[in-house]
Amino acid sequence: MTTTTKEAVQPAVVDSVPEERRRRRRSTGEDALFRPRGVFKVIIQILLAIATVITLFPFYAMVIMSFKAPTAMTFPDSLFPTDLTISAYAYVLQSDEMLRWALNTLIYSVVSVVLVLLLSSMAAYAFAKKRFPGRTPMFWMIIAMLMVPYHITLIPLFVMIAGADGVNTYWGLIAPSLANAQAIFLLRQFIIALPDELLEAAKLDGASEIRIFFQVVLPLCKPILATLGLFVFLWHWNDFLWPLIIAQTPEMRVLTTGVSSLMRESQPLNIQLASAALAILPIFIAYLFAQRYFTQGVTMSGMKG
């Protein structure tokens, strides 16, 4: 009789345990949501969502309006228009001027990225791993350039480039950006953390300084090089003021100055917006391809050095 009672009661107790755990978990989750910290997280997420919408809305409006005919544009416009056309994009893609500006921007950006990374990594390697007289004062002089506003140097740069017949030339566009103090600083902070034993082992194997730099140091710097390459590419692709000063002919304009000239020439609004949308498209593509290295490089350059 007693045995039967125990067997009848025991399963009920066992079955009630998971139910109690589930009830406890639900109550814990609900309590956590209404705790001050949980409420604060919800508020932060709402604010971030609002900030994201505010940030992306101008781009959304730009893209939507670029697909509309000039006669169909109204203010305020519908968020979900139906009368869309690709005529503006067809016009822009068939424009010889737009293709020329895109080519100029690509040359300006890609060549600047390659040269800035090469020269900055060489300088950073020397400051990080080599001993020579005046190394520290020279490094701090380069770092001091970070405190000089970019706009202050425009006039002397233009005078030097114009004196060397660099106006309306590719090298006149590219040359002033090759001495990049920020790139030298970040690369130096990264390279200084590389183990000296690795470089010494390469020397014992008979490797020259050039071989050590290109086959040992640079491969280890891939994350920070990708990060800097992305920054330099975006900077030159979006650069407006220096190309506006140095590239004075329509044939030497880049996308930023070219799209700006469309407004001065009173081009239809949908063509201006389509040109702007196509101009920023490579920026998103570049970030998507380099996103992993971008995150790693920023983290590692902040931790080392």
Image (cartoon, rainbow, N blue to C red):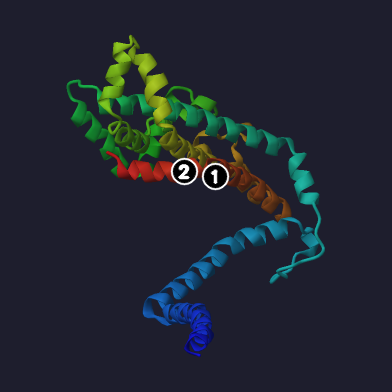
Q: Is residue 240 visible?
A: no
Q: Circle 2 is placed at which residue position?
A: 294
Q: Nearer the viewer, residue 237 or 253?
A: 237
Q: Secondary structure at mark 1?
A: helix
Pointer 1 residue: 287
Reply above or below: 76 against 86.
below
Residue that protrudes farthest toward the top in the picture: 206
Where in the figure is residue 134, as x and y percent of width and height?
A: 18, 25
Q: Residue furthest left?
A: 133
Q: Residues within 10 Å of mark 1 (few under 14, many from 20)?
A: some
Q: Does 234 sit left or right of 129 as displayed?
A: right
Q: Position of residue 160 (x, y in %)?
A: 40, 27
The mark that comes first in sequence, 1 or 2, is 1
Residue name at image x 33 percent, y 9 percent: 206
Residue 101, percent across and down?
64, 36
In the displayed structure, 90 sits above or below 247; it is below
Verify CB contact (< 8 Å) between mark 1 and mark 2: yes
Give the residue type at disc 1: Tyr
Q: Residue at x 50, y 43 (%)?
A: 292
Identify the secondary structure beneath mark 2. helix
**Position of residue 293 in the picture relative to residue 71 (left or right):** left
> Would you identify the image quadrant in which residue 95 lies?
top right
Q: CA distance from mark 1 to mark 2?
A: 8 Å
The residue that appears at 37% across and 79% down in the rendered structure is 36
Q: Which residue occupies 43% across, 79% down? A: 28
Name the spot of residue 219 as percent of width and height, x first. Answer: 43, 27
Tell me the kind of residue under disc 2: Phe
- Residue 237's disc is none
